[in-house]
Amino acid sequence: MKSSLFESAPLLRIVIYLMSGILIGEFAGRLFPLMPVFVIVLAFTALLWKYEMLQSVGISLCFLLLGMHLIVSQKDALQVVWPDAEVCYEAVVLSEPVEKPKTMAVDVLITGSGRKLKCYLSKDHRSRMLRIGDGLRIQSLIRPIGEWRIGTFDYKRYMETHGFTGSTFVTGRKWQRAQVTLVSINRLDRTRIFFLKLRSRLLGRLRTHDGNADAYAVVAAMVLGDKTTLSKDLREVYSVTGASHVLALSGLHLGIIYMLLSWLLAGRRWQLPAMLAIILSVWAFVFLVGMTISVVRSATMLTVYSLLSLGHRDKMSLNVLAFAAIVMLMTNPLSLFDVGFLMSFAAVASILLFSPLFQGFLPQGYLLEHPLVRWVSSMVVVSLSAQVGVAPLIAYYFGRLSTFFLITNFIVIPAVTLILYGSLVVLLVPSLAYILLYSVSWLNVILGYISRLPGATIEMHPTPLQTVMVYVIIVACYLLIGRIVPKVGWSPSRKGL
């Protein structure tokens, strides 16, 4: 560990200043004209090319100001003054209807302005039959997003992070299906609607009529990112057992798909075309599952990984993770306040940092001779490393820690692989869906049994300050180990950096 984190991963410093600027802009607002100051600082920084130290300070300040500008500009764009009276507008449905106690909730995109709304329709046969891509003509009163909290959940910030600018309730007589034009919608939104409609059709192939709703809900979440059918009880089982991460599409799922594509398209002769085909397929899958934050992060890292692999360079590193964070924060700075963003990056960063340390405690010669032992040790190391990074966030946001997460991972991670491959078969041969769902129902049964074991979860509710202090301690421990390890003659692998 001779080099520091910042020397091994220079983009890490940049992402820290970018995140700091976003935090300052979120809580302090527009303190001064940000863009003119940014341009001035950038110009002075360019002139300091002979003074390395001063130029580094200037670059850091530029990204701090950029973060402030991005978050303030995005929040300004989300502030819409809606009329006090009912308005008529055309919209396209972006999500499957979700049944609420008194309404059916759907996400809609106004075709004229491109604004996203959370739309609550009167519960009836017509609203239940809506599908993604359906056009609507609506007359209603649109209201700004309300401010309310439940524990650590900030509803308004969640809605802003996902691009919603208002909500509306529509009675049964004030909306109807209509043929709407998507010409005024930007190309990205049109592409997303196309893939969401395709996902809806693929989900239909996974459905059966045998009443196995929980098994279908798990498959839909794991394979195509649709969590709307997950029941509260099922979510609780996966949360208590520490298996919630398999319900949220992430690097695990995309990595399995990437390995399958690499195996199918392997060949040195057509390496560049094959790699481009893999990258395009990965991003098509990202659109198909709704472009969730964890999947976008994983796809960005896999894209960089693929491009670096062409030049036989060091591939998956903390620097690549920092690059993915910079891209995502510059695209949507409000992502910084999304629990999915925080947990995704915390888990991967922790794996990259702590896996080499934990691996160093194991006898490498013995592992190389015993593949099964190597697989078990690798599973333990990765699971423990990820848990170090996400445990404080889990405790803060969800008020619990799973004690059986290690056992659970030995069950769910192989299961995810089988479910993904099995789903590909079912999508080609829908009549085999019942076999897949029957297998998943047994997974639910096993996790349900684990969730009922004594001491399966530890309840705790740390404050924001306590959560931050835990991370300070984790970083301090990592740096301390970096100081001690060379002195005792042990040198763990540095592959993570």
Image: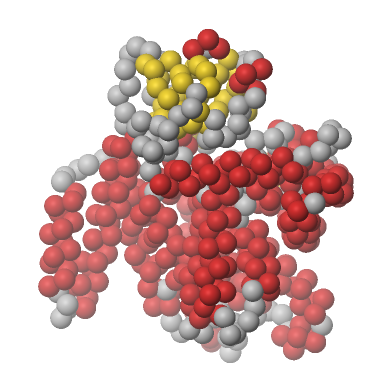
| Lateral position of residue 290 relative to residue 370, left or right | left
Quadrant hosting residue 457? top right
In the rendered image, residue 228, in percent from the top left (x then y), is placed at: 65, 35
In the displayed structure, does residue 408 sit left or right of residue 301?
Answer: right
In the rendered image, residue 406, in percent from the top left (x then y), is placed at 75, 59
User: Which colour assignment does the render follow?
Assistant: secondary structure
Residue 395 in view of the camera: no
Q: Residue at x 72, y 67 (%)?
A: 380
- The residue lying at 16 percent from left, 71 percent from top is 46
- Name the residue located 60 percent from the left edge and 31 percent from the top edge: 131
Q: Nearer the viewer, residue 402 or 217?
A: 217
> In the rendered image of this protein, does residue 245 appear above or below residue 72?
below
Extreme top residue here?
Answer: 173
179 in relation to 284, above or below:
above
**Which residue is found at the position 62% from the left and 60% from the top?**
254
Q: Is residue 376 left or right of residue 287?
A: right
Residue 227 point in image, percent of width and height:
65, 40
On screen, residue 63 versus residue 367, left or right, reads: left
Give the number of marks.
Answer: 0
Q: Quadrant of residue 368?
A: bottom right
Quarter of the image for residue 444 reads: top right
